[in-house]
Image: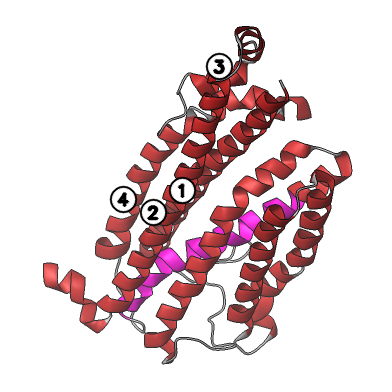
Amino acid sequence: MFQLLEPNRIFSITSKAPKYVLLLFILVVSIGLTEALILSPEDYKQSHSVRIMYVHVPAAWISLGIFSTITILSIVGYIFKIKNFFLISKSLAPSGFVFNLIALVTGSIWGKPTWGTWWAWDARITSMLILALFYLMYLIAWRIYEDKEQVFKVTSIITILGIINVPIIKYSVDWWNTLHQPASINILSKSTIHSSMLVPLLIMTAAFALFSLLIFLMKYNTELIKIKNKGLDRL
Amino acid sequence: MISEIFYMDGYGIYVWGSFAFTFLSFMSLYLVIKNQYEREKNKFIVKFGNLNSERAASARLQRINREILSNTSTI
């Protein structure tokens, strides 16, 4: 099965896919923006400021999802010595980091009209900031270390340490008294968000997921060409 | 109607500010990654052009090299 993930085999797919993903992203984000900024209702408490949710929440979800994926790929890649998993992880990290930054900045902007402050050292916000630092360490590690074995080891350690923070982010609003509101969307129990807000939220999440897929594909292709460049040097 | 969309009962600056930051982040990330991609691809084309005919023929045997040279991945 792992042979199917061999870079030479999948380049022919990944090199053609970005343009289709970009078109699909433009279509989905256009629908999402119309829903989020015009059609969805305002909140009875937060008024129009609730619209920030449509960029803040998907960005936070995707940054957490990408970090979890990177961790799983790094651990499996390290145990079974699958170099391509590290290449996939490396290609996922930039969009994960940018989504993390978007979640932090839009959360801060949302905090001003809602809490009266741009920033609070609250458990959810602080743990998201810590995640951004782990992303940063991960990206820097790829730049610092040139030896492959060393970079695989260091990045795996960073993701293993960083993943401890992910359940803390998720449950911080339940474990501590925080300014941040508890989750409105639950997979296992009934969500407390109305469908008129849930639909645009899901559309925007799909758009953000498509954008991260687009960036992943472009970065992955870049990394493959980088490897091929080194191969040409050896010819 | 239009001014209502922009003003949003005084929350417009926060809402539009958040969406603008997101848009700028997306654009910056896209351009940075695209730039890296183009740089590596151009490097590859130059290196491939510098190969002698025997080595170029050997490199051309690999499907991935042909894909890179065929320019299919440009978006």
Residue with the mark numbered 2: B27
Q: Residue at x 66, y 12 (%)?
A: B55
* Quadrant (top left, top right, bottom left, bottom right) of the N terminus of chain A: top right
Q: Is B42 situated left or right of A4 in this image?
A: left
Viewer-nearest residue: B2 or A89:
A89
Mark 3: give few (<14), some (14-19) or many (20+) Cα within 10 Å: some
User: In 3D space, how far apart are the residues under numbered discs 3 and 2 (Cα atoms)?
Assistant: 30 Å
Both labels 2 and 1 in a single chain: no
Residue with the mark numbered 1: A211
Viewer-nearest residue: A235 or A43:
A235
**Type of amino acid under label 4:** Ile
Magenta extent: A47-72
Image height check: is A185 above or below A147? below
Residue with the mark numbered 3: B66
**Type of amino acid under label 3:** Arg
Task: Report the coloring of the rendering.
Answer: secondary structure
Chain hosting mark 1:
A
Both labels 1 and 4 in a single chain: yes
**Type of amino acid under label 1:** Phe
State which mark lies toward you, 4 or 2.
2
Viewer-nearest residue: A33 or A96:
A96
